[in-house]
Amino acid sequence: MRYRSISLFALIIAAAPLLFGCSGSKTVSSAVDPEPVTPQSIVFDWQEPYKNKLDEFMASDQFKAQGSGGVGASMFDLRDLTGDNIPELMISPDTDHGTPCQIYTCSGGALSSLGETGDYGMFRFLPALGLVSDEYQGTGFTIGKYLGFENGELVPVVTYSDNTASAATGAIIVHEINGEEVSLPEFDAALEEYRSSPSCNMGRKYTFGEKAVDYAVYCSESWGAVLTPSQKQQYRLLLSSEYEAAQQTGTDVAFELCDLNADDMPELIISEGTFDGASCKIYYINNDEVSQLDGNYGSDGRLGLDIAQSVFYAYGASENTYWSLTDSSFSAAGYTASDSTMECGRKFLLSPDTIEAALN
């Protein structure tokens, strides 16, 4: 593997820690611009149950610290799937065929399972509809369902099957929705809402390294409380402008708040899409103003982040490109990856609702 590095000067933002507690939701200060807080000082009642579940999984026979050839190790994800502003925990044991994701939720500090779904250690989620897609394609046929969350479990909203791919073999073609045979136009119409809704793969965002677990559980969901109202408003205006532009171009824009330089202040990453060559723009807070980092970063609209080393990177066909905001003399030649990495850039598909969700 060849490596290429580009060094960047650190973004140094002073932050005075302030204890800030809550249970399940953030406590909002009445001050217009409250004193800076650290993400670790924000307390949610789901944090310890999820940390305990991750520790329990790491001690189990299902846990794989390393996969075959360095690929396929256990990973996990945190994302609000049910629309209650509390993230669910998803654990991906590996990337083998037939391996589903385990999904957990937390209410009042009590952990419960929402079931398992997916394949190859991940599943497809439709954020706008709050639904999970579960589809299997066999030889000449497709069966699938869209599932929603109801009463603490995954339940089918619509099921379907189709064997159009068997037409060349002379098979009788049958299209079914919810177990009933329908015409092809009826079949397509019944699934149009689901097929046209933007989706993202879930389950494999974080590795199980200590720093990655700590960042995910104690930092990743706290940025809305860390940013001041004026800082959030600046990010909100920027994202709203990007959304308006995306509506004109039809591009699949996404974004994420992520701390790239371990200063307890999130950078804003905006991904222009998932097409080949798609890149990310990075914005940061400097003296309470938003500035853009020169250049475009990432590959396929995503960045990798080594949380322990504060190094972010893009995968390339023949070489990786690495950057550091904390070390102006950084060189990839002397860099050794840690076990605490994550994918960043596409946590939220850009929309007015997700802008408010990220900045609440």
Image (tube, rainbow, N blue to C red):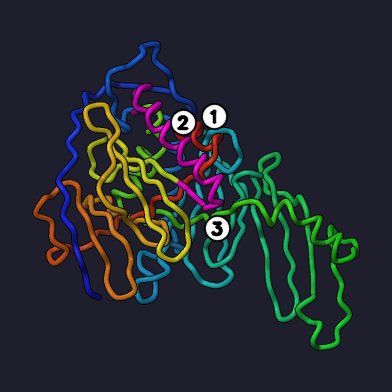
The residue lying at 79 percent from left, 86 percent from top is: 168
Q: Is residue 244 magenta?
A: yes
Q: Nearer the viewer, residue 35 or 353?
A: 353
The residue at which mark 2 appears reads as: 45
The residue lying at 20 percent from left, 52 percent from top is: 324
**Which secondary structure, mark 1?**
loop
Specify whether 97 is left or right of 78: right
Q: Amino acid at mark 3?
A: Cys
Q: Residues within 10 Å of mark 3 (few under 14, many from 20)?
A: many
In the image, is residue 232 above or below residue 246? above
Q: Amino acid at mark 2?
A: Asp
Q: Amino acid at mark 1?
A: Gly
Residue range highlighted in magenta: 227-254
Q: Depth-wise, is mark 3 or mark 1 nearer the camera?
A: 3
Q: Earlier in the sequence, mark 3 or mark 2?
A: 2
**Which secondary structure, mark 3?**
strand
The residue at which mark 1 appears reads as: 108
Q: Nearer the viewer, residue 270 or 139?
A: 270
Q: Nearer the viewer, residue 158 or 245?
A: 245
Q: Is residue 218 magenta?
A: no
Q: Is residue 99 visible?
A: yes
